[in-house]
Every structure is written in structure tokens, then in C-alpha cells.
Image (cartoon, grey):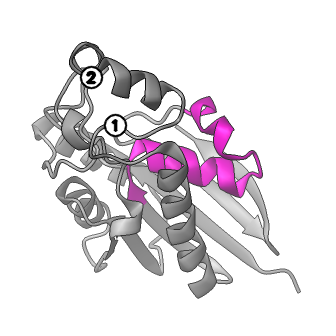
């Protein structure tokens, strides 16, 4: 008999730094009022209660989890955090490019920003956390609340696309994706 695992991936709602080009990966921010309203609207669209909710340990994701599933206790996992931008946290990319020109070139080639995380380390951390979660659940329905970069990495990994394909997905604040995994074979069934 086939085993079906329904996985719902949710990005947190908007924060004050949720602006194009701003790096704020590990910065622990709460959602702003618009973000809270986005998550409340998403809650009205969701159906079914997951058996477990996993979340990045950053405030914006824990808050999102609690608004979406108030009867659940989210399992906080640092592995589900966004990429660390190190000294670039809170900066617009043009400022980082101007202040750290050598680091910027390194980052564009897959390296780490000063004090931050490189793309490969980030991808391996996130997909390792995902594999840990999947190892706990063979079937049923679970949810993961995380960040755009993490959800991109998880989708690329689940769909067998490889880390270089993470840029093929765009997940807006309070956006979600649903993946059904049948006997280890993942299919993207919903995105938006």
C-alpha cells in the first residue's frame, strides 16, 4: 500500500524589512501589521489540521505558525532559518556591494558574505533539516513555516532539481506550496 505525506510549506508574513533588496536572513523580526493580516487571510484558505508543525526558530515564523494553527505547538528548528548574511544583515544589496566589493564578488560566485553563510552550507543545512523532518513522518499531513530561501531550497531538493535551481521559485510573504510525497516521490500540487 502506498504511503502519502502531504507537506505544506508556508512563508512567514511581511516584516518591516521585507523590501526588495534588503538582506535580513537571521535578524529576528516580528511580522508587521500587514504581515499579520496576510497570515490571517491565509488561515481562512487553509484546510485541515496538520499532525505536526515545524518552524524556523525566528519570531516571524513562530508567530505565523501560531496564527495559522493555534492548537498546535510548533517545533522550532534552527535548521529552518533563512541564510545568514552576516555583516550585511539589514543592508540593501547595493550598500553591501559598495561597502564590501570583494565580498560581493565572492558572494555572487557562491561564497559567503562577511560573517555569513555560503549558498552550499545554507542549502545543506536546510535540506538536512527537511530530511530530519521527513524521517519522522511517513504519511499524513505536516506543515513547515519558514523563509523564502528555505522554501526554495526544500522545493528544489524535493523535486530533484538540485541546489542551482532554487532561483526558479518565488514565494511571497504569506505564500505557500503544497507537496505530496508518495513512496518517496514528490509532486508539487499547489503554489501561491
Q: Secondary structure at mark 2?
A: loop
In the picture of the structure, the residue carrying the numbered disc 2 is 100
Q: Which residue is mark 1?
A: 113
**Residue 13 vs residue 111: left or right?**
left
Inspect the magenta stretch and tell me whether residue 148 lies in it: yes
Image-based side of 28 in relation to 21, left or right: left
Circle number at residue 128? none
Does 72 sit above or below residue 6? below
Report the quarter where the N terminus lies. bottom right
Q: Indicate the quadrant where residue 135 lies.
A: bottom right
Q: Residue at x 60, y 39 (%)?
A: 166
Q: Splitting the image into 4 quarters, where does residue 55 fall? A: bottom left
Decide: is 24 above or below 61: above
Q: CA distance from mark 2 to mark 1?
A: 9 Å
- Dominant SS of magenta comes to helix
Q: Position of residue 90 (x, y in %)?
A: 16, 32
115 versus 34 height, above or below: below
Label 1 SS:
loop
Residue 57, compared with residue 81, is above or below; it is below
The magenta span reads: 145-169
Task: Find residue 80 and report its horizontal and vertical position in percent.
Answer: 40, 62
Q: Earlier in the sequence, mark 2 or mark 1?
A: 2
Q: Residues within 10 Å of mark 2 (few under 14, many from 20)?
A: some
Amino acid at each position: 500500500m502506498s504511503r502519502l505525506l502531504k507537506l505544506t510549506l508556508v512563508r512567514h508574513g511581511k516584516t518591516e524589512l521585507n523590501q526588495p533588496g534588503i538582506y535580513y536572513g537571521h535578524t529576528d523580526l516580528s511580522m508587521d501589521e500587514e504581515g499579520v493580516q496576510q497570515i490571517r487571510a491565509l488561515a481562512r484558505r487553509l484546510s485541515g489540521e496538520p499532525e505536526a508543525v515545524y518552524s524556523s526558530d525566528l519570531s516571524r515564523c513562530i508567530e505565523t505558525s501560531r496564527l495559522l494553527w493555534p492548537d498546535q505547538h510548533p517545533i522550532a528548528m534552527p535548521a529552518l532559518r533563512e541564510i545568514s548574511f552576516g555583516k550585511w544583515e539589514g543592508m540593501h544589496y547595493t550598500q553591501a556591494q559598495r561597502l564590501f566589493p570583494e565580498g560581493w564578488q565572492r558572494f555572487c560566485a557562491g561564497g559567503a558574505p562577511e560573517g555569513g553563510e555560503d549558498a552550499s552550507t545554507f542549502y545543506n543545512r536546510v535540506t538536512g533539516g527537511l530530511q530530519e523532518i521527513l524521517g519522522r513522518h511517513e504519511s499524513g499531513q505536516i506543515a513547515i513555516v519558514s523563509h523564502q530561501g528555505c522554501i526554495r531550497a526544500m522545493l528544489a531538493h524535493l523535486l530533484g532539481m538540485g541546489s542551482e535551481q532554487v532561483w526558479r521559485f518565488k514565494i511571497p510573504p504569506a505564500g505557500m506550496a503544497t507537496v505530496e510525497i508518495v513512496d518517496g516521490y514528490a509532486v508539487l500540487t499547489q503554489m501561491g
